[in-house]
Amino acid sequence: MADMKAQRDAYGEVIAELGKKYPNMYVLDADLTKSTKTATFKKEFPERHINCGIAEGNMMAVAAGIATCGNIVFASSFAMFAAGRAYEQIRNSVCYAHNNVKIVATHAGLTVGEDGATHQCLEDLGLMRSIPGMVVLAPSDAGSTKAACRFAAEYDGPVYIRLGRLPLTCFNDEQNYKFGLEQADVLMEGDFATVMFCGPFYDLAMQVREIFANNGLNIRVVDVPCIKPINRTVVKNAANETKAIVTIEDHNIYGGLGSAVAEALAEEKIENRNPVELIRIGAQDRFGKSGSPKELLASYGFDAAAIAKKIVDTVCPECADKFKF
Amino acid sequence: METKDFAKNMRKLIVEAIYNSGSGHPGGSLSCADIVAVLFNEEMNKSCECPNDPDRDRFVMSKGHAAATLYSALALKGFFPPEEMKTFRKIGGRLEGHPDMKNIPGVDMSTGSLGQGISASCGMAVYGKKAGKNYRVYTVMGDGELEEGQCWEAFMFAAHYKLDNLCVFIDFNGLQIDGEITKVMSPLPIPEKMKAFGFNVIEINGHDLDEIRAALKNAKETKGMPTAVVCHTVKGKGVSFMENVASWHGTAPNKEQYEQAIKEIEANG
């Protein structure tokens, strides 16, 4: 299970599989077929793959038009141009019209790396989450990417699926892992604090857990691949049963997982603690920049020791001296 | 019903609906009424008995602010009762200010944000070609709408995929909200640009029913490329005080103006 695989490779494989199951499935791309991996579908079903060129706004409304004829349409580009540039086409032609379009946006977040800020979309979850009726998914490995796409194909209505560029540790089974609305998986139980992550942060979350384990403390680790609708029970339980919640996302702290969790905390009845300590790890209202993904993540605070320190400072500042980071 | 009378009844419903609601877009709704009348009354394979027939011809009002024109044609064709036009733009009704495909039978695409309807039309047409369907896709666009860059992305797409099942009518009335299109942001020359983008281009008087019919015939006979029918029209056509006046783009008539408009429309026929 410790293999590494890029989510977009899983995406290419799963749409080729879904193309067999659904003869009414079409896949659209905007001149990035080799990067988004829709080329895999094109090879199998050339008649049902449509390259729209570098024109994402047109692509989203073309997708809507194809969907009006009773088809399932997957449309892909980089997150910046899918959710960002084509926001209004997604809002009006796809979502307001409730057309059956699945937007699978790759290369999201800082982990794009060297291409820098113009290509590092840190706002897409916020943009997509604010559209009525849109389901927003940020799967966390190859298995959950496949499950998210299978779910999206089955689901009648618009879905946004956010994928990253880097190979990620595989922790969900590619064939058998199932996905539904409000998907949230408690991977590790714990009572000291809860780490909730989405996207490329399984390894980081486990590293944070490891640091606390070395200090005799248990961190709950929750994978939250469904950002909207968010699983409020899992959030509520984390607030009631652990001393702090940390959200980790390759996104601005506004609009994404951290915001969704904060909203749930503000509205749910939390028995034990009010307010609940919430630490949002993400881009702190900043744009990205060029660099290797590893260097970028470190410089934006995605670092296990730094996160552990924040948790200790919040939950038990008096323990900091004795804590081994 | 003769198409001439169909168009006249459409105009009456348009003006009445906008008067009742106290808001709407009479100028651009009246300028494209004759085009829409020929399409709905003669040309399209589209019926209220089976509004979602997968083989029906598609109609997209890309200039969605002319919703009243589309609704009037649908009402006259039995998709909903003409009396329902009284609920246009009113809370509790389904006749949204801009066309809503979710709730209104016969509306093939939700439009209103300019430039998107033509792209959706391309989606319908490219699917029709790929799936071997015989339906045709008809789209009405505004001349001011051509200022949206997305239109040109869609035109590029339509020519690239040889969408000869797509016929685009451009309602060339020369006016937009802020005034003459040539003064606000000129999209001219339209026919030359459309030709350069790979369209079969026909220029007609958009109020001459025979010229509209001839253009439709030409479009159907043209293979391997989409057709654009550049329709010279008069904004506010049929109501003397609205004709060629930009301020009637988005203004409702008062009672006196409404009564005068109905009188004129009836007399014109």
Image (cartoon, rainbow, N blue to C red):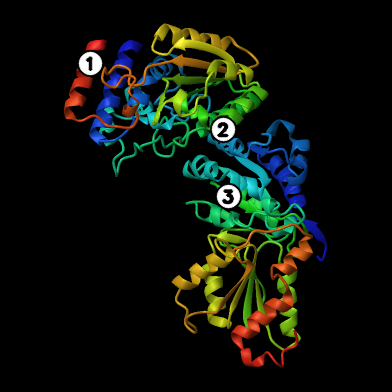
The reply to whether discs 3 and 2 touch (Cβ–Cβ < 8 Å) is: no
Can residue A272 be spotted in the picture? yes
| Quadrant into which the N terminus of chain A falls | bottom right
In percent of width and height, residue A130 lies at: 50, 55
Q: Quadrant of residue A29?
A: top right
Q: Which mark is residue B264?
A: 1
Are discs 2 and 1 located on one and the same chain? yes
Direction front: furthest residue: B183
Does residue B70 appear to the left or right of A133 in the view shown? Answer: left
The amino acid on which the numbered mark 3 sits, given as a three-letter code, is Val
Seen from the viewer's position, the closer of residues B49 and B72 is B72
Nearer-N-terminus badge (2/1): 2
Seen from the viewer's position, the closer of residues A252 and A23 is A252
Say what secondary structure mark 3 lies in: strand
Which residue is at 55% across, 16% downward?
Answer: B191
Please identify, in this view, whether the residue under mark 3 or under mark 1 is nearer the observer.
1
| Quadrant into which the C terminus of chain A falls | bottom right
Which residue is at 65% across, 16% downward?
Answer: B224
Q: Measure how far apart labels 3 and 1 are at the Cα level.
A: 50 Å
Does residue B159 appear to the left or right of B238 in the view shown? Answer: right
Say what secondary structure mark 2 lies in: helix
Which residue is at 59% across, 23% downward?
Answer: B133
Residue A209, placed above or below residue B161:
below
In percent of width and height, residue B132 lies at: 63, 23
The residue at which mark 3 appears reads as A159
The amino acid on which the numbered mark 2 sits, given as a three-letter code, is Gly
Q: Measure how far apart labels 3 and 2 are at the Cα level.
A: 26 Å
The amino acid on which the numbered mark 1 sits, given as a three-letter code, is Glu
The chain to which mark 1 is attached is: B
Seen from the viewer's position, the closer of residues A312 and B81 is A312
The residue at which mark 2 appears reads as B149
